[in-house]
Amino acid sequence: MCPTSKEKAQNGTAKRLEGRTSSLEAEDADLLRMMNRPRPVNIERNRSFDERSFSELSTTLSPPRISHIFDFLDTTYSPGRWTGTPRSTSCYDTHPMVGEAWEALRRSLVYFRGNAVGTIAALDHSSEELNYDQVFLRDFIPSALAFLMNGEPEVVKNFLLKTLRLQSWEKKVDRFKLGEGVMPASFKVLHDPVRNSETIAADFGESAIGRVAPVDSGFWWIILLRAYTKSTGDNSLAELPECQKGMRLILDLCLSEGFDTFPTLLCADGCSMIDRRMGVYGYPIEIQALFFMALRCALLLLKNDDEGKDCADRVRKRLNALSYHMRNYFWLDLKQLNDIYRYRTEEYSHTAVNKFNVMPDSLPEWVFDFMPCRGGYFIGNVSPARMDFRWFCLGNCVAILSSMATPEQASAIMDLIEARWGDLVGEMPLKICYPAMESHEWRIVTGCDTKNTSWSYHNGGSWPVLLWLLTAACIKTGRPQMARRAIELAESRLMKDHWPEYYDGKHGRYVGKQARKYQTWSIAGYLVAKMMLEDPSHLGMISIEEDKQMQTGMRRSASWV
């Protein structure tokens, strides 16, 4: 990338990084050697899509589509065999949005010393850049999946290795040192035209709004490493000592013992995609679902040596406890809602039904109308005397993909989305959470945040990037027609509106008041959704089958009964 005037103005930042530069250059020499070292490729020829979902697809797809899907069953899936163009010769690659999307995605690529290492958050030159000209770890996930699905894994490999190097940096906020395993929220390539050199500046939360470390970054890194391995069939990257150590450091942060009485992770507000004050402190569903997914991916990636075995044993124990806790205490359906409505309080003993001493009067009025007769979802948060009944898209979709949700719960989540389509999808997929906080509640919970006003941004805004997660969940549960309907809605607006970051309004009718245009993950999310729908075998990159050993007896109500 050519240096811009703004990048030249950042030389002061580059000079402050001089202390790191020499060690970074040595690290990058090692990085390049790792990237260029020839490695034996171990190709797994297992289909990356579960047979159960194929059988369900056969009953839901229209006849012309059935023959297309089952073409994939007649050939052995060989990951990583593409040469840079989409496999499908159907309407996917002839839709005018697809070419435009790929051009925009490639324009967003960031290069460090000649190698593509990620994509910037947005290419909107009409607005102040702030940190939208950085490579965000969470934002790069849909871009990475798009490149993997299109047979271009090199940029993903570079990104994984570069962020792994950044993990080893000393991380401080003021005088406090962060844990060794913390992954950056973002990084930026700085160009020094005087010295003709490039350096990297990483943000571990010290520059973020609210100064909160990104809890989700490490989880997404593990999930992406597994997706890369599954897509390419190349285990050698994950088996590098550096990658194994990086995984263990992330897991050590999460599995350390403390005062916790729950297997869930205690988090501050603003530590994930919802990176502003939104009342998600405590045990937010997004973090718990990503935590579960990362643990399951780690089990598949950890080597069978002494360190790997010890870490894997700790992971299994936590997974068993976490799956039980989430499936029992975070799950809400019509009968469970009625049970909470009738809860007694101040129960004291291990036989208590109302284990968290939740006050029935704290139930919001909207939830009684929102809950359909068939359907259910994982609520936003559960902690002592508090339940956040809001519906969060990312947490519920990842719960399906990771199999944190049982197959019956996964179907119930999709039933709810279908029953409340107008509320959750509306005119532009997809609500990040529902409903929005308004009036006094908005003032108290957000601190009068003018960006998170009602039905805007994180407070009930509609985010096109979530389309890929919805599509993946639809395919896994055998409901591709729901994904197709959502994609058609997005196609009617996204390109004409210049790929905005989010939409505002109860039904997502208006481009967000502060939304950046040409938001990279809006572009990549559409491409990933489109490619998955055309070739459902891609689902195997980001979906994991249910572990029968983790099946826990459901003591609470179930919407499918």
Image (tube, grey):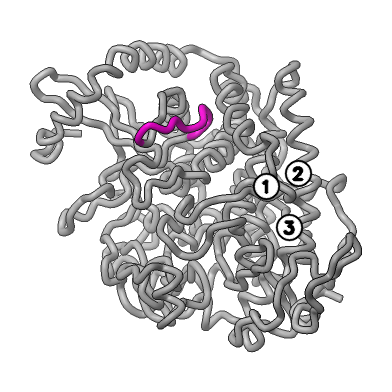
Assign a secondary structure to mark 2: helix
Label placed on residue 319: 2
Which three-letter amino acid code belongs to the residue tagged 2?
A: Leu
Q: Nearer the viewer, mark 1 or mark 3?
A: 3
Residue at left offset 44%, top offset 59% = 465
**Any magenta on residue 267?**
no
Position of residue 117 measured from the top left corner of the image (x, y, whole percent): 36, 32
Distance, label 1 to label 3, CA atoms, is 10 Å
Which three-letter amino acid code belongs to the residue tagged 1?
A: Phe
Which three-letter amino acid code belongs to the residue tagged 3?
A: Met
Q: Name the residue carrying label 1.
A: 292
Q: Which residues are magenta?
A: 174-182
Question: In which quadrant will I find the C terminus?
Answer: bottom right
The image shows a total of numbered marks equal to: 3
Disc 1 + disc 2, Cβ < 8 Å: yes
Position of residue 151 measured from the top left corner of the image (x, y, whole percent): 48, 38
Residue at left offset 91%, top offset 64% = 351
Q: Most prominent secondary structure in the magenta stretch?
A: loop
Residue at left offset 67%, top offset 43% = 48
Q: Name the residue carrying label 3.
A: 326
